[in-house]
């Protein structure tokens, strides 16, 4: 897969490195799926899964030798977002900087559009 610079969602270099580290202990061909589900304290929340298969409606983002998948329904909520990885005093976590979110929670995984 060739890496493309323009996607409706981007993956930071830090996130790509962390995903690569996680996938290094998984079976060959594993990918990270990011999706949006109902729930969380703000109404919607992000979900992360390791998967082996791509679905027909998935957006596949290649960066740093890893693939991140986002299904077409979740993409509607994530358009313009950046998937990042943060390592600070509070801890380590993936964070999605979503310009569509009008409210969020302190943990950074739940949001409202």
Image (cartoon, rainbow, N blue to C red):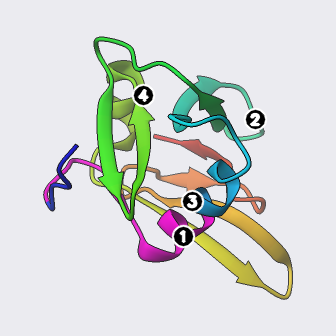
Contact between marks 1 and 3 (CB within 8 A): the answer is: yes
Dot 4 surroundings within 10 Å: few (below 14), some, or many (20 or more)? some
Q: Quadrant of the C terminus?
A: top left
The quadrant in which residue 12 appears is bottom left
Quickly name the residue at label 3. 20
In the current view of this chain or complex, which residue is farthest to the front?
28
Q: Which of marks 2 and 3 is in front?
A: 3
- How far from the left and from the top, in percent, is residue 94? 64, 60
Dot 3 surroundings within 10 Å: few (below 14), some, or many (20 or more)? many
Quickly name the residue at label 2. 40
C-alpha gap between disc 4 and disc 3: 22 Å
The quadrant in which residue 65 appears is bottom left
Quickly name the residue at label 4. 74
Taking 33 as reference, is 8 above or below it? below
C-alpha gap between disc 2 and disc 4: 15 Å
Element on which disc 2 rests? loop
Tag 3 or tag 2, which sits nearer the N-term? 3
Taking 62 as reference, is 91 above or below it? below
Dot 2 surroundings within 10 Å: few (below 14), some, or many (20 or more)? some
Tag 2 or tag 1, which sits nearer the N-term? 1
Contact between marks 2 and 4 (CB within 8 A): the answer is: no
Quickly name the residue at label 1. 17
Magenta stretch: give its range.
6-18
Tag 4 or tag 2, which sits nearer the N-term? 2
């Amino acid at each position: 897969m060739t890496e493309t610079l323009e996607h409706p969602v981007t993956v930071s270099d830090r996130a790509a490195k962390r995903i690569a580290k996680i996938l290094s202990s998984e079976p060959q061909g594993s990918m990270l799926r990011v999706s949006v589900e109902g729930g969380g304290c703000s109404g919607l929340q992000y979900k992360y899964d390791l998967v082996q298969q791509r679905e027909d409606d998935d957006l596949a983002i290649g960066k740093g030798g890893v693939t991140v998948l986002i299904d077409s329904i979740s993409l509607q909520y994530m358009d313009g977002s950046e998937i990042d990885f943060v390592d600070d005093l509070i801890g380590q976590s993936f964070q999605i900087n979503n310009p569509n979110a009008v409210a969020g929670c302190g943990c950074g995984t739940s949001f409202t559009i």
